[in-house]
Amino acid sequence: MTTTIEDLQTICHRLPATTEDIKWDVHLCFNVGGKMFLLTTPDDVPPTATFKVTPEQFEQLIGQPGFRPASHLARYYWVHIDDVGRLSVARWEQLIRESYRLVAEKLPLKARRVLGV
């Protein structure tokens, strides 16, 4: 079964204090503490996504088909995938949790406590 934007949305909303909004008119974004951890473009065919990874994951992923450094965000180790359906829901769960963790751990301690992250 092909992974959908709705699958990603479900994964994101299982994480504490996740919010979603539309940025730049076309991107469905998922945030923690006001900081984005997943950016999707649901109206693209196929739908695409951009997310934060570790430096090691960055090097590994950009060498795989369908992945590339994310425009304007690559220097912060964000990658872009050209089709969310390339990955299983289980793999997406791992990647989204990691992106969430990387973003949440950079929030100020007070914000993390308030959000419960």
Image: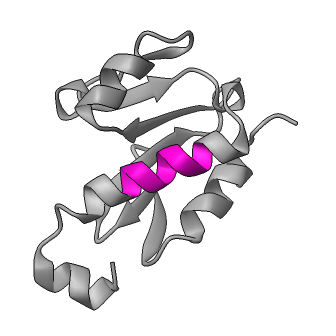
State whether residue 2 appears in this view.
Answer: yes
State whether residue 26 appears in this view.
Answer: no
Q: Quadrant of the C terminus?
A: bottom left
Picture coordinates of residue 67 (x, y %)? Answer: 48, 17
Picture coordinates of residue 40 (x, y %)? Answer: 53, 41
Picture coordinates of residue 81 (x, y %)? Answer: 52, 24
- Apparent side of residue 34 relative to residue 65 in the rendered image (left or right): left
Residue 51 versus residue 23 in the image, above or below: above
Residue, x 44% and y 26% (percent of image)? 80
Residue, x 32% and y 33% (percent of image)? 78
Picture coordinates of residue 73 (x, y %)? Answer: 24, 31
Identify the image quadrant of residue 9: bottom right
- Apparent side of residue 7 relative to residue 92 in the rendered image (left or right): right
Indicate yes or no whether the magenta region holds residue 50: no
Farthest-out residue, bottom: 114
The residue lying toward the viewer, choosing from 94 and 50, is: 94
- Apparent side of residue 45 relative to residue 21 in the rendered image (left or right): right
Residue 37 versus residue 17 in the image, above or below: above
Residue, x 24% and y 30% (percent of image)? 55
Farthest-out residue, right: 1
Residue 33 versus residue 94 in the image, above or below: below
**Mostly what secondary structure, the magenta segment?**
helix
Q: Which residues are magenta?
A: 92-100
Indicate yes or no whether the magenta region holds residue 95: yes
- Apparent side of residue 20 relative to residue 69 in the rendered image (left or right): right
Residue, x 28% and y 64% (percent of image)? 104
Residue 37 versus residue 91 in the image, above or below: below
